[in-house]
Amino acid sequence: MNIDLHCHSNVSDGALAPGEVARRAARAGVAVWALTDHDQLAGLAEARAAARDEGMRFVDGVEISVTWRGTTVHVVGLRIDPGNADLAAGLAAVRGGRLQRARAMAHDLQRAGIDGTYEGAIERAENPAMVSRTHFARFLVDSGVVADMREAFRRFLVPGKPGYVPHQWAELADAVRWIGAAGGQAVLAHPGRYGLSAGAMDALLQEFRAAGGEAIEVVTSSHSAEQSRHFAALAVQYDFSASRGSDFHGPDEGAEFGTLPPLDPALRPVWREWGL
Ligand code: AMP
Ligand code: MN
Ligand code: MN
Ligand code: MN
């Protein structure tokens, strides 16, 4: 069964509306699907309805931005109750400040000789309050400054490069607590992307577990085969369940539905108790 538990709509930094994402997932053969927009639940109702029309099992999800020891890490919440007040309040606090950060990012890019990025990014955001680095990257591609999204995130928008502005997101323990309050399971997203040393990864995994984290993503589009094997081994070692998700953001942006390898059957999947 094709299970995909991580992707985005234009409610955050995805390119397609929630219903379009649902139809794309279904067409690619996804049978169990979660929408996990960044810090935002507003797409879930449309996604759920579209998934039902497609005969696809739907999982309410979210991806929370966290600052852990100065590094941005992402925590996915699965099977959350979208009506939970604690989660809603926490996410509202995390979302605040994106517009101001975008101004600072644009200022920094202007100093590097690139004009108009604030307007360009805002124009590309369905909801300006959710403007993200992805919208800046799309503008840099569209205006020919870079050839593709990879280049945008190699030359700009990352620590040490023009357009990067440090930001304080949620505390790790708070994000996990909000997900738990909403009855969901907390999953550490794409651990291979954080560039952490073995010692720092150990500290993150221990802290995540102590906070109530249940699973880590093992198979995801930004992991190489070797990284998937590495995090499969860590899931076993730390007794985490394992998750799988494309992290689809839009057509031609790297990740696509229906193309991920399966989870190693020796792992305990995060969906084991879901009665699928
Ligand atoms: P933000 O929440 O505004 O900091 O934006 C983070 C988003 O930027 C992530 O959710 C990804 O969608 C995107 N992103 C970050 N790094 C990369 C990368 N190296 N390649 C492609 N997209 C990236
Ligand atoms: Mn994103
Ligand atoms: Mn992420
Ligand atoms: Mn994501």
Image (cartoon, grey):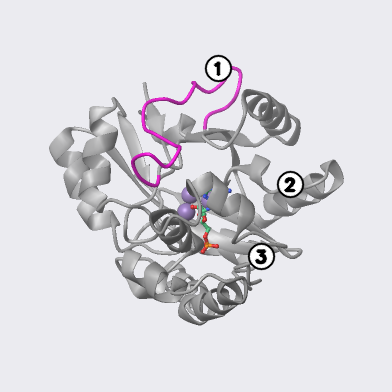
**Label 1 sits on what residue type?**
Pro
- Residue at image x 41%, y 68%? 121
**Is residue 80 shown above or below 105?**
above
Q: Decide: few, some or many residues near mark 3? Use Cα within 10 Å; few <14, some 14-19, many ≥20.
A: some
Cα separation, mark 2 vs mark 3, equals: 14 Å
Please name the predominant secondary structure of the magenta segment in the image.
loop
**Is residue 131 shown above or below 189?**
below
- Residue 255 spot, x, y in % from top left: 44, 37
Is residue 256 located in the magenta-colored stretch of the structure?
yes
- Dot 1 falls on a residue whose secondary structure is loop
**Label 2 sits on what residue type?**
Gly
Q: Earlier in the sequence, mark 2 or mark 3?
A: 3
Quadrant of the image for the C terminus? top left
Q: Decide: few, some or many residues near mark 2? Use Cα within 10 Å; few <14, some 14-19, many ≥20.
A: few
Q: Is mark 2 within 8 Å of ligand 1?
A: no
Mark 2, residue position: 195
Between circles 2 and 3, the one closer to the viewer is 2
Magenta segment range? 249-269
Tell me the number on the disc at residue 265.
Answer: 1
Q: Quadrant of residue 183?
A: bottom left
Q: Quadrant of residue 43?
A: bottom left
Between circles 2 and 1, the one closer to the viewer is 2
Quadrant of the image for the N terminus? top left
Q: Nearer the viewer, residue 64 or 251?
A: 251
- Residue at image x 39%, y 47%? 249
Mark 3, residue position: 67
Cα separation, mark 3 vs mark 1, equals: 32 Å
